[in-house]
Amino acid sequence: MTVQRERLEADVLIVGAGPAGLSCALHLANLIKKHNESGEVAAGAPQLSAENIYVLEKGREIGAHQLSGAIMNPKALAELVPDFQKSAPLDTPVTDDAALLFTKSKSFRFPLTPPPFKNQGNYVVSLNRIVKWLGGLVEKAGVNLFTQFGGASLVYEGEGIGGVITEDKGLDKNGNPKDNYTPGYELRAKVTVLAEGPRGSLTKQLVTQKKLDNINPQSYGLGIKELWDVQPGRIAPGYVAHTLGWPISTDMYGGGWIYGLSNNRLSIGLVVALEYADPLFDPHAAFQIWKTHPFVRKILQDGKLVRYGAKSLPYGGWYSMPRNYVDGALIIGDAGSFLDSQRLKGIHLAMKSGMLAAETIFEALKASDTSSKMLSTFPRKIEQSYIKTELWQVRNFHQSFQHGLFPGLLHSGLQFITGGRGLIDPMRAHAGYQAYKKIDGQPAPPRFQGDGKLTFDRLTDVYHSGTRHEEDQPCHLIVRDLNVCSTKCVVEYGNPCQYFCPAAVYEIVKDNDGQPRLKINAANCVHCKTCDIADPYQIIDWVVPEGGGGPNYDGM
Amino acid sequence: MKILVVTEQRQGKWNNTSFETLAAAQQIAADASSTVSALVIGKGVGHLAEELAARNVAEVLLVEHDLLEVYTPDGYCVALSQVINAAQPDMVLFPHTYQVRDFAPKLAAALAKGLIGDCIGYRNDGGKLVFVRQMFQGKTVSDVTFQGAAPWFASFQSGAFRADSLAAHPSGKAPVNKVAVELKTEQIRTKPLELFKEAKSSVDLTQAPLIVAIGRGIKAPENIQLAQTLAKALGGEIAASRPICDEGWLPMERQIGSSGQTVAPKLYLALGISGAIQHVVGMKGARTIVAINKDQNAPIFEIADYGVVGDIFEIMPALTEALEKAKFA
């Protein structure tokens, strides 16, 4: 079917309204306003307009797909919105930061909180609320913000990118148009900014197509989070704890968090690096088991689960940062590896990367030149900013842990004293999915069943993510060869998709003839991208479903 | 400027969006010192043409032919091409109906013209007409205008103009002019069948007093028959949890739960349903819940009033038999 698409032209098209994308939009709108009011325009410089900035967001509303712990360093926000303390929903400043070591039944607090875990001056926030608030400022600045529209494919032009095609709406399961069929728009832009978050589907296309990978492939973690309302007095607002150890074995990288928000609300979660050896490992179950630790159980007792969600995060850091500029496009935020995996901080770096992108674009628009030569000032700006300073110190951090906790601690200790260099610099990393060991006939473990009070099965948790999709639409999880699942993967790795997916999307069912078959419950998907990352054969492509589908991370 | 409005009728009854489009045409004409003609197409629709003549129009074109009695895209396209070529309007306006969506693009293409579909308004931009269309699901609008020579084609969205703003004819009545068209049977490639209305939903589960619902425990589509027989014996409706409808074993309208129907029958018989929260939210309002499941730990038993830990394939036929016996006893 050839489709005639409506075409629109913009100066700047930003894909994804997260902290990076919105900071880029707001900073650029501010620069344009200043420019238009300055003498430059009167002197003949081109007039620019914030109305020619478009932002696409696949979520139902701004913030709907935002999930983070979250502790925010307000550094970048203070630059972007100098009086942010007056209106930003900051929730609560960090008052206490503990590093805890869990054994099965005990917990030990490190007498001194290691420097990376220090959070004085930071805020415990709901990223969903911060982003919603930021979205309001962006709209007020005159930027066109389109929710419920995702970037489905890139428009290649010359050596680079000419824009994006949004997803087709109103297609049925088999891809045939329904009554409400509307083909995606072809949005042309002088600069396209990919701010899709970790493992963005367009970013993946672009990085592969143009071979933009750095010396290390990107490493990822999966964060699983629950928001609880707990009994009064259980936890002080601003209390922050990170846990190491049980139930995460020492050959894996990961840990838990407990953050106290205001009004007896609690953010808890578990992060694991998606580079473990056991293909039958179930991160969601590990999180549920973590909650049964006496330390956590005591806090949650008689509390109530409010919301659930999961999201991947890029761990790779400096040496995994893809080349972030091509003709007509930039990559920012988590999509561009702007995250400090040691301090577990990405929000301020994402925002800063967006702001530096805005400055780059502003200069390019003024010069009417958006070629890669002009945009190559973006990485230079990063080099000169605190993004480089912060990420450079930890450039080998995550790689150290690819061989387990103890070598990791040793290496990272040495790196700490040598300003990040350590014993080997640059330290290489392998893609996480390569770490799987074959199951060798190992039987599948029984699935985790929750008690319905403290612990939950995945379907119950997914219910609390508020996830909703139009049911009658093509599956947005494209498995390139289903035979691999039912013949090869089942023998070699025991279909790890059933275990790593925190939303019970992937399910192996037995047909009448006893043959295993992959059933994809796409409507459960919380858009965490884990399947695209952790599939051992790399044959799953996560593509955007019909806009508006996905989780509703209110308050997350 | 000569504006022609193509109205829509079916079996001699108006599609009322036609009048909204006529109102739009009158407004455009008032702005640009133009004339408006209205067109009625069909067979035996003279009375509709007379009705239109009472409005403020320059003339009404009546296009009738045996082959236009029932709508076909080919018939309309051939006939209207002839009328447009003869009448030479500058602009042709349509109500944006399903029928117009079907034939108008074809008509415009046959005349090598553009069509601006689904407009919500217009502006007169220094003598040039600019049409306004919604984009991004109404979050923004775009201005669209024509290039090239007339006639130009556009359609207006239902509700974009008010039919009650339609002006009456100033001096009583406009002339109705019949326009003859040549149309041959072989030009019409579609064979229209009898009109039908799609059944809204053949079943309204929300009104069913007894529901027999099946889940994954049914295992295969051929086993659904057993549950259906039981439902029939009970005088209840069959329904299902998500996986069953997802597989296409039962239609989507029979799905109970957060992404399906919410029901509160007198009796809800849950067969082989585990009771995931997504399903439970759609049926927990049932007065009596009876659950049969072979897994005694299935969460459905937490909300069931009566629970049977057992094999549905043993119980379903036995229950059906008992019910049949009771009926004849």
Image: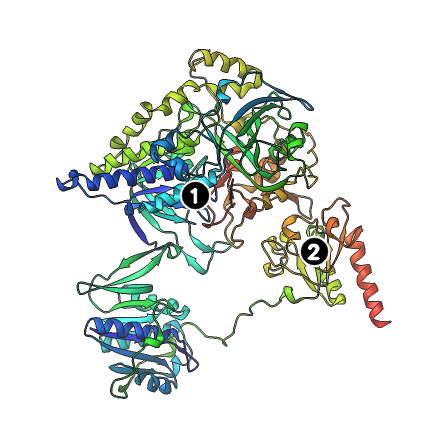
Q: Is residue B182 visible?
A: yes
Amino acid type, label 1:
Lys
Marks 1 and 2, how far apart in space? 41 Å
B25 relative to A143, above or below: below
Tag of residue B145: none
Can marks 1 and 2 be said to lie on one chain? no
- SS at mark 1 in the image: helix
* Residue closest to the eye, B255 or B226: B255
Label 2: element kind: strand
What number is the disc on residue B214?
A: 2
Residue B162, image x, y percentages: 35, 72
Q: Height in image: A224 above or below B134? A: above
Labels 1, 2: front one: 1
x%, y% of residue A430?
49, 23
Taking B132 as reference, is B85 above or below it?
below
Q: Quadrant of the N terminus of chain A?
A: bottom left
Relative image position of residue A258 (x, y in whole percent) = 57, 30
Q: Residues within 10 Å of mark 1 (few under 14, many from 20)?
A: many
Closer-to-camera residue (B307/B233): B307
Mark 1 highlights which residue? A132
In front of the other: A501 or A420: A420
Q: Amino acid at mark 2?
A: Ile
The x, y position of residue A509, in whole percent, is: 65, 44
In the rendered image, the residue lying farthest to the left is A43
- Would you say A328 lies left or right of B257 here? left
- Residue toward you, B68 or A283: A283
Chain bearing tag 2 is B
Say whether residue A344 is left or right of residue A437: left
